[in-house]
Amino acid sequence: MTDIPANATGAADAIRIGTMVKCNIADPAAYVREILPHGFESIEPFFWQTLGGKDIPRLAGELREAIGDADVTMSTLGMFGNPLEETDTDRQTLEGWKTLIDNAHLFGAHTIAGFTGRVRGKPIEASLPRFREVWSELSRRAADKGVRLAFENCSMEGNWATGDWNIAHNPDAWELIFNEVPEDNLGLEWEPCHQMVYLIDPMPQIRKWAPKFFHVHGKDATIRWEVIREHGVFGKVPFVFMRTPGFGDSNWTDVISELRLAGYTGSIDIEGWHDPVYRDALEMTGQVAGLNYLKRCRGGAEFVANPAGARALA
């Protein structure tokens, strides 16, 4: 019999299935109270570019109160913007990272996620000195608080030669950035979608890079191969759509199996608002369908304990 790693056979909820929650809106706690009855097991509160004047300790208390006695975690917080540049908004993004690091414990969070930032309009290599300066300091600040920092693997329509937001969207770039700042508390907020946009097979990445996966987003993609054959990539006709899990090309049973074999025990939080079909009035319909799909791919909604005899043979 082939040996299976011990950490690959944990309880069903060792990987929780949840969703992201926008915190730039007026009342995130009210939103959380409304969606939790659908069965989400975790939430990732996140901000776009700035904290929007939010009192972060107060927000943490409001979200904890909204969750109440429900078995729902907030293990990861999001801060998405460009902390490497120097506009007023960029500086607010950087300060937002610092504030969330300092207050992560109030949410029960141990990971802050977002973009690396980028020196705008330059090749990836041009951002490395500024990346080293900013993220060396942030990683030390986070380590002092017992917090990990994770970079989402989203190109934000950039590429190797140019872009506005993020350099951590390509495995070759991951090699560069983790060589620049080789700290154990720097990792990735990974999802298969953003690799599929590059026509990269995401499955081998799990096997190679899973030790750096601090958080996983539930987002998929549909690749339109007939468009690629006729129009190519990045032409007039879209060749790929971002999708809610269950509506895209990925087999999430395989994804979750590989994550478990690699020892991943965090959450998979659905990143909505991208699916071209399940959006607007159908947004939560799609998210709940994705939630239930991912639970099935995980092995079900509930952990089923082995009988006593079977446990003795484990």
Image (spheres, rainbow, N blue to C red):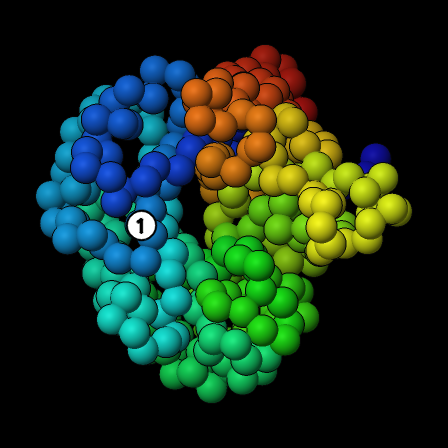
Q: Regarding mark 1 in the picture, which secondary structure is present there?
A: strand
Q: Give the residue pinned by disc 1.
A: 47
Residue at (63%, 67%) from the top-left corner?
Answer: 159
- Work out whether 152 lies above or below 160: above
Vertical relation: 311 (above or below) 267: above
Q: Name the image quarter holding the N terminus.
A: top right
Q: In the image, residue 271 lies at what x, y percent?
A: 48, 38
Point out residue 234 in the picture as x, y percentages from the top left corner.
Answer: 71, 55
Residue under the image location 56 percent in, 33 percent down: 275
Question: Count of labels shown?
Answer: 1
Residue 302 lies left or right of residue 310; in this view the side is left
- Picture quarter containing residue 98? bottom left
Amino acid at dot 1: Phe
Query: Which quadrant would the C terminus be assigned to in this image?
Result: top right
Q: Is residue 206 left or right of residue 94?
A: right
Residue at position x 82%, y 49% in the image: 231
